[in-house]
Image (cartoon, rainbow, N blue to C red):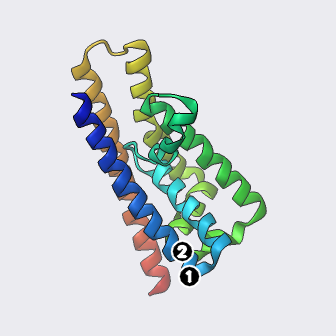
Amino acid sequence: MSTPRRFSLIFIKLTFFFSFFAFSMLHLIAEHGLQDGVHLSALCWTTYVMCLPFSGGGILLYPLAPLVGALSWYVWELWAWICSILLHSVTLCYNRSLYEKTSITHFIYWAITHPVPYWGLFIICFLPIIATWLYRKHHIPSNALWYYQIRFLLILIALFLLAYIGLHDLIILSNIYA
């Protein structure tokens, strides 16, 4: 991919992600106050990082690139996962009631506290990052076509598992509230 096109795609990704993230954060701040709104938006971001198999959560950390230098995108995704896990650990220890304020944070709380089948979703969503790391760093598999097929298959499996779990939870919630 040529350099100007690559930078255009990065600019488009940054623009869409930060505009969506900013409007979501403003809505949560208006509804729940400054401290809880920022915390809730960070928890929503972690749900995006941990439950969707395609990369994109690390884009929030991309403005740090001038400070730390140019890193591969899978490194940013790995740091996004680390930040997500740390944020959930702190929130579970100190402010568990915050998860009950939005449906997205309630879902991630339920997923974290009930390992089966949700932790399988987390693992499957993390596998494309591992596949990318193996391909970029160690050239495993050596053929680019195999790498893209493996990565596509991992993303597809994770999306089907997310859809199955989401549909199952929707059925459970609709029976509870019916």
The reply, left or right, for residue 22 in relation to residue 16 is right
Please name the amino acid that badge 1 sits on.
Answer: Glu
Residue sitting at the far right: 94
The answer to whether residue 79 is above or below residue 72 is below
Mark 1 burial class by Cα count in 10 Å: few <14, some 14-19, many 20+ = few
Residue 151 visible? The answer is yes
The residue singled out by tag 2 in the image is 28
Quarter of the rendering occupied by the C terminus: bottom left
CA–CA distance between discs 1 and 2? 5 Å
| Whole-percent x, y for residue 86 in the image | 67, 47
Q: Which mark is residue 31?
A: 1
Residue 150: which quarter of the image?
A: top left
Q: Total number of numbered labels?
A: 2
Camera-nearest residue between 106 and 170: 106
User: Are the residues at dot 1 and dot 2 in contact (C-beta closer than 8 Å)?
Assistant: yes
Please name the amino acid that badge 2 sits on.
Answer: Leu
Element type where label 1 sits in the image: helix
- Residue at 60% x, 62% y is 109
Residue sitting at the far bottom: 178
| Whole-percent x, y for residue 133 in the image | 44, 24
Q: Which mark is residue 118?
A: none
